[in-house]
Each structure stands twice: as C-alpha cells, then as structure tokens.
Image (cartoon, rainbow, N blue to C red):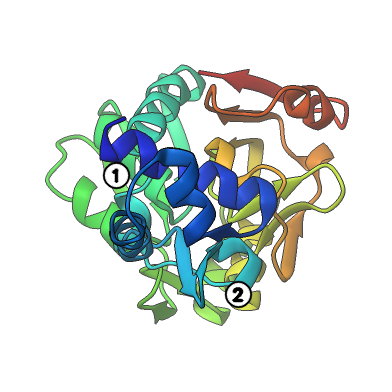
C-alpha cells in the first residue's frame, strides 16, 4: 500500500471511530510505529488530524478550524469535481455570490466571464481580479485571517441591499439533525445574510463535512436548493439530506 492510500485510510478510520491508535495501525498495515507516526504528522500538517498521546483524533472532534491554506490541500480532487459540477448551477448572466471557502475558491477559478460576482473572500477576489468582463463586488468588514473572509457589520449592511441569482455556499459541517454549521459566530451571521440575499442556494461540501456539526448554525437544510458533494459520501447520507428538501448531486 502506498503512503497516500494508507493515510487516506487512516483519516477515514479516525472520522469513523473518533480516534486512531499508533500500535493498532502499525499492526493492521504491517508497518513500523515510526511509519505510522510519520503518517500522522503529515496528516496533522494537512490540518485533518490532531496528534494526541498514542494516536490522533480528527480535527472535527476538537472544534478546530483549519486555515484556508490547510484546507486547500485537503480533498483536492473531490473539490475540483464539485466545482466543475457547480458550473451547471451558474446562470448564463446575472449576479452570483461566492462564500469564502476552498471549494468555492475552486469554482471561482472556473467561472465564465460576464457575471457580477459578490464575495466576502479576499482570496477569491484576487482570483477574479484579472478576469475580463467580470463585475467583482468585494464585501467589506473585519478580515478573519484564518479564513480570509470579511465579517461583521460592514459585510452585513452590504448584504441587506444585495440580491443575487445564486449563492454558492461553503460550510464546515452539514447534517440532517443540525443543518449547516461553522465554528465562528461572526462568519455564521454573514452566511445567514448571504442565504437571505439569494434566489437560490447551492452548497458545495465534500463528504468529510457531511455528518459533522460545529458551534454556530447558519442555515437549515430546507433553505438549501442543491447540495453538491463527492462520491466518498457514506451510503444513505444523500437520502437523509434530500429528505429535508435539497437536491443532492454526488460527483
């Protein structure tokens, strides 16, 4: 088994069981303890696991919020597929909103010209700045360095006077029980305002977000028109989400 395959399996086990143990992993994969420790260190650097005594736990269990840079290197092929599928939801003309996030950032890279794009993401704004025939609107406010998103009153005031055709949203967690959630209350407030400002809402979320819950809820599932996720989604979860109203697209 290649290191990348082994590390992917370690992450899946950690999310399924809540923890992985060095000794057990070494035995199951027939590798040394040091090899497992190197795997865990690499996964911690990618922001998906946190090392603890004797093993590691998924960052979701800590309520830990990875930086945008850390998230951008995780689930890259899945995010690319999700972004490509999201192009089907982009109108031929008009206004859209891109929430701050690594998957919405991938969508920004693929957007056609001729749109008005509203965003609270500095990184997405920088991606779109050179784009010809794109009317870029950057929401102001306090900048959160961890996510490169603007938040608080300036952003909220602008969104009160904004109406777009589609809002492409990001999330840290989504579940049938608690809807869409994120660790930070300031970002949650802006995300709520984004959803209110849109005719349609499309959530871009890789399968690792599904089933996870964070501190602040910003939307219920019945407020979402479409969820685009990837084929790593566990059996039955797509149906659970769809039961609350959104169309679920698995790519």
Front residue of 125/209: it is 209
Q: Where is residue 238 in the image (x, y as percent from the top left)?
A: 73, 25
The residue shown at (68%, 51%) is 17
Front residue of 99/76: it is 76
The residue shown at (83%, 29%) is 240
* Residue 166 position (above or below residue 124): above
Residue where numbered disc 1 is placed: 135
> Earlier along the polypeptide chain: callout 2 or callout 1?
1
**Does residue 204 appear anywhere in the picture?**
no
Crowding near the residue tagged with mark 2, few <14, some 14–19, many ≥20 C-alpha atoms within 10 Å: some
* Residue 245 position (above or below residue 195): above
Residue where numbered disc 2 is placed: 184
Crowding near the residue tagged with mark 1, few <14, some 14–19, many ≥20 C-alpha atoms within 10 Å: some
Front residue of 2/246: it is 2
Q: Which mark is residue 26?
A: none
Q: In which quarter of the image is the N terminus?
A: top left
Q: Position of residue 152 (x, y in %)?
A: 55, 79
In the picture, measured across the screen, residue 136 lies left or right of residue 183, that is: left
Q: Distance between the residues labelled 2 and 1?
A: 29 Å
The residue shown at (72%, 58%) is 213
The residue shown at (66%, 46%) is 16
In the picture, measured across the screen, residue 61 lies left or right of residue 51, that is: right
* Residue 178 position (above or below residue 88): below
- Quadrant housing residue 36: bottom left
């Amino acid at each position: 088994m290649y290191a990348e395959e082994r590390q992917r399996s370690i992450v899946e086990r950690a999310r399924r069981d809540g923890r992985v143990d060095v000794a057990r992993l070494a035995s199951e994969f027939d590798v040394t303890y040091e090899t497992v420790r190197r795997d865990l260190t690499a996964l911690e650097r990618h922001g998906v696991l946190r090392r603890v005594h004797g093993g590691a736990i998924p960052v979701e269990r800590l309520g830990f919020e990875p930086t945008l840079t850390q998230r951008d290197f995780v689930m890259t092929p899945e995010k690319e597929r999700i972004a490509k599928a999201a192009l089907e939801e982009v109108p031929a003309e008009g206004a859209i909103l891109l929430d701050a996030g690594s998957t919405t950032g991938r969508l920004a890279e693929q957007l056609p010209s001729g749109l008005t794009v509203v965003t609270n993401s500095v990184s997405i704004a920088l991606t779109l700045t050179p784009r010809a025939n794109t009317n870029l609107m950057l929401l102001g406010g306090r900048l959160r360095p961890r996510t490169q998103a603007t938040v608080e009153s300036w952003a909220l005031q602008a969104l009160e006077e904004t109406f777009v055709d589609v809002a492409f949203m990001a999330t840290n967690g989504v579940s049938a029980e608690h809807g869409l959630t994120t660790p930070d209350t300031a970002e949650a407030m802006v995300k709520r305002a984004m959803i209110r400002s849109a005719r349609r809402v499309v959530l871009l979320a890789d399968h690792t977000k599904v089933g996870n819950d964070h501190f602040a809820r910003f939307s219920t599932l019945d407020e979402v028109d479409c969820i685009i996720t990837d084929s790593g989604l566990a059996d039955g979860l797509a149906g659970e989400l769809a039961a609350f109203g959104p169309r679920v697209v698995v790519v």
